[in-house]
Amino acid sequence: MHTAEPLLALRGVSRSFPAGEDSVTVLRDVDLDIGAGEMVAIVGPSGSGKSTLMNLLGCLDQPSTGSYRIAGQDTRTLDDDQLARLRREHFGFVFQRYHLLGDLDAQDNVAMPAVYAGTPPAARAARARALLERLGLPHRIGYRPAQLSGGQQQRVSIARALMNGGQVILADEPTGALDSASGEEVLGILEALNAAGHTVILVTHDMQVAAHARRVVEISDGRIVADRRAAPSAAAAPARIEAGAAALPAAGAGRHGAAAWPRLAEAGRMAAIAMRAHKLRTLLTMLGIIIGIASVVSVVALGEGSRQRILQDISAIGTNTIEVYPGAGFGDERAARVQTLNTRDADALAGQPFVASVSPGVSASRSVRYRNVSATASIAGVGAGYADVRGLTLAAGRWFGEDAVGLRAQQAVIDDNTRKAFFASAQQAVGKILVLGNVPCRVVGVTAPKQSTFGGNDSLTVWIPYTTAMTRLLGQNYLKSITVRVADDVPTAAAQAAIESLLQRRHGRSDFYVNNMDTIRQTIESTSATMTLLISLIAVISLLVGGIGVMNIMLVSVTERTREIGVRMAVGARPGDIRVQFLLEAALVCLTGGIGGVLLAGLGRLAFTVFADGFPMVFSAAAVSGALLCSTAIGVLFGFLPARNAARMKPIDALARE
Ligand code: ADP
Ligand code: MG
């Protein structure tokens, strides 16, 4: 620093504040020089402008007119970051109300200025502890402000002022809230600091307090009315601070390696502390995100689960299967009256070189009776190869064979629901005689229970040879369907075209329609893609709503924590530091909410597997990480406005609000 200039020099400084239409001038034409190492008391009645002057001296505020030079440098040429650096590296503030952060313990409060200076955590902690010991608080290091007396809090705040060196200590009514004994103690400390070389500026309305300084500047109604210097007193100032100074870890060690990452980590820690300090509010803030993410993840998992199960079913049937039905297409009402599809068609198809096997099908609903129990079942007349074509497995017995089909045998295979309706076990069912309509049939096989896609299906199905069904049960000579299994080396699409043209030729018109499993699979794939898109859209909307909730609370939180922002700025936080802190907090709240949502969805799945037996939910890593990424992005997006508001605050406005 330049030696010819006084350390602090105000020239023609005025400060006025807007008040409604016009403005009030609080300081008028102030000239003041303060040299390095001085101890100056600024006295005056309440409202005379002392604090305003102090804020100007500490670069918390800037003059409306006039100049302020610090060691020869005009503060008008400095931007917000440079002013923050001045506060951080050269000034230390001591406030009447201490302005400690209630969520941090004594050590963290003291160490805060070093965070913004980029001091490594270990060095920071060591110096903070040493300072607290030096100030007589070795046993209060882990205490929160609320657990400390006023005098102790003020000593913590003095330690904070010294954290980065505290070349100039600015104390605004430091004894104003203290009893006289603690007040004397604090003044003693300030004197000792002055004796140790610190420049001390003490603001007070109390002449007795002012008497501790050798220079007294009197201010009245915004003007300096007196500037007295006492003769140097013979009594040496107490030197107990100085005595231990050598033992203190250096201020700002490693400061110049101040990288962005440690500061980011620190902001993350602060965000976590803030979240922990307001658990309920944080939880409520997250709720929208939790519910949004949980529902999105569940619905996506459910969609994926049922899609996979349907595709599994299809692949069990095989994609080289083609179904032929009477009528013009799915849902054709006249299809039931179309009677042109018959066994001769089936035989003709079976004779084609590209066909591996054919299973004709008929169906009807009939009552089924065993002794005195009866129920209604769907009776399906099918071929011997039907179980293979459909991927059905048997729990007991066997499927009826080609011989049974040829002989119109009265044999039946029943599904698990039918078995449950009449018999205690599958083994017991085999060999029994069921009466279908009025046709008795022997049960030869029971299928294994089939996992259905959604919940349970409780309809009863009985399969009998199609020949039996057509002649003995239904008395009809036309078919409900023909299932064709295409030979392995033939493309399904070509086979389908050949089948269509063959039947067209046989019938002379197109009174049938053809489905192949591959097109059904494609339809399901594209339908589920559409569903996923739709769900994602709803997800985005619900997350937006959640995000707006977060933004709302964060805006309130910024207002509520104005004083904290002010304190952080006073100890040298850059606007960017404040912005990152709030942005990170919003992102962290949302990320935590996202994690909570994923956990909730997992819990929901667990509940479903316990109570609803096999609800198909498939959590993919992509969906989960997508959800977390999305929630974090929402936090950053909606935290932006609150964070910007916080960073734009002027330190003086932030501190003024109490
Ligand atoms: P002191 O610290 O000497 O009691 P202050 O410097 O706090 O006095 O305030 C001096 C005058 O300036 C008071 O009348 C106060 O109302 C006014 N004042 C201080 N800050 C502001 C502000 N930000 N806006 C408007 N008026 C202010
Ligand atoms: Mg004041």
Image: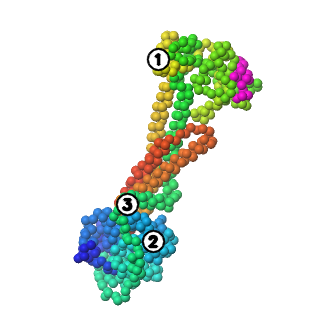
Query: In the rendered structure, which amino acid carries the disc numbered 3?
Result: Asp
Query: Which comes before the other along the chain, label 3 or label 1?
Result: 1
Q: Which residue is mark 3?
A: 577
Q: Which residue is mark 1?
A: 497
Q: Which residue is mark 2?
A: 129
Query: Which SS class for mark 2?
Result: helix
Can residue 545 be seen here? The reply is no
Residue 253 placed where, x, y %? 37, 67
Outermost residue to the right:
372
Residue 448 placed where, x, y %? 65, 30
Q: How far separated are the C-alphas under marks 3 and 1?
A: 70 Å
Asked if the residue at label 1 sits under 8 Å from ligand 1, the reply is no
In this picture, residue 277 sits left or right of residue 245:
right
Q: Is residue 557 magenta?
A: no
Can residue 74 be seen here? The reply is yes
Q: Is residue 442 magenta?
A: yes
Q: In the drawing, what numbered circle is on residue 543? A: none
Residue 580 placed where, x, y %? 39, 57
Query: Which comes before the other along the chain, label 1 or label 2?
Result: 2
Residue 637 placed where, x, y %? 40, 50
Rendered position, 241 above or below 494? below
